[in-house]
Amino acid sequence: MNTTGRLSAYAIGLVLIFGVAAGAGRAVGPDQTPAPAAAHSGAHAAPVAEQRLPGGLQIAQDGYRLSPVTTRLSTEAAQPFRFQVLGPDGEPVTGYTENHEKDLHLIVVRRDMSGYQHVHPVLGADGTWEVPLRVDTPGQYRVLADFQPAAAGGPLTLGVDVPAPGDYQPVALPQPAKTAEVDGYTVTLDGDLQGGALGFSVSRDGQPVTDLEPYLGARGHLVVLREGDLAYLHVHPTSETALAFAAEVPSPGAYRLYLDFQHAGTVRTAEFTLTTAGVMLPAAPTGHTGVTPPAAPTGHDADGHTHD
């Protein structure tokens, strides 16, 4: 056989061999070997969108961390409460963007949502915040810092638990109501959480109070916390001349509203309970004497510090 004939025969043999192999492969089934991982091929999976939690649930977020220096609260004389906000480099943050006329708002409230305080600490040169603080009753308190670092793109709310040692007696969450009394003032709520529009009016001795003073750049300041985890809702004033706010509720549940308003140089706090549709609070047991709730603060001075 000449050279051309031998090459032709060899080629025909290869075709026959691969044809038999392909038939055997079809008889056995498709290849079950897993495809190589994307990381090995240089491809990357699409990033999963981050679901942002409500404020106050985390001690750290976006590289910033709330770091208490003081580890317990006092139920006797007011004691300095100190803390820092640590930045992505691990150092205390010293530059902040003003928000509602303050660089930082500190909310202190017991885990059963009683004993609410809204204060404004002073920032030291070393990045340590300090404010004199006293709570009325023992228990576990949630400390919420609402602030915006100068290097950050937006505000943050970080939270940490700090105890007040002693005999803790929990207080039941008050039932929903549209009016609240504080220091002789009657505050009436108009609106609900479903719509998200919340309006308030203030009266005294049956007469409307029409000369409320600006507080933190608005007619008032509203904080809304969710029962159970004390998630902090960002609430925005919607009017420069009225106590009107917009709130976005992240989930069904019961919420506690704390409205700060200023009149005659004193800041007072009216408190409300609201529930979303279909949520009912348990009624107090029949004959239950309960525990006397801690007395609400009689007010704040003009810089937001509570006083008796």
Image: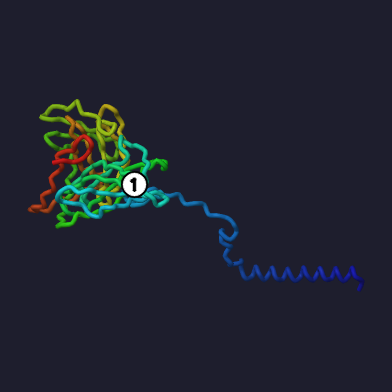
Q: Quadrant of the N terminus?
A: bottom right
Circle 1 sits on which residue? 126
Against 291, residue 201 (above or below) is above
Residue 258 or residue 153, whichever sits in front: 153
The local secondary structure at tag 1 comes to loop
Taking the spot 89% from the left edge, 68% from the top edge, the residue there is 4
As drawn, is 210 to the left or to the right of 250?
left
Taking the spot 92% from the left edge, 71% from the top edge, the residue there is 2
As drawn, is 168 to the left or to the right of 240?
left
Q: Position of residue 32 (x, y in %)?
A: 58, 67
Against 27, residue 213 (above or below) is above
Q: Is residue 200 visible?
A: yes
Q: Residues within 10 Å of mark 1 (few under 14, many from 20)?
A: few
Q: Residue furthest front?
A: 125
Taking the spot 72% from the left edge, 71% from the top edge, the residue there is 20
Q: Position of residue 69 (x, y in %)?
A: 28, 53
Q: Is residue 277 visible?
A: no
Q: Quadrant of the C terminus?
A: top left
Q: Residue furthest right?
A: 2
The type of residue carrying mark 1 is Asp
As drawn, is 154 to the left or to the right of 211?
right
Q: Quadrant of residue 153?
A: top left
Q: Position of residue 7 (x, y in %)?
A: 86, 69
Q: Residue furthest bottom?
A: 1
Residue 140 or residue 259, whichever sits in front: 140
Q: Position of residue 141 (x, y in %)?
A: 23, 51
Colouring of the image:
rainbow
Total labels drawn: 1
Residue 105 or residue 38, whichever sits in front: 105
Q: Quadrant of residue 206?
A: top left
Taking the spot 28% from the left edge, 47% from the top edge, the residue there is 144
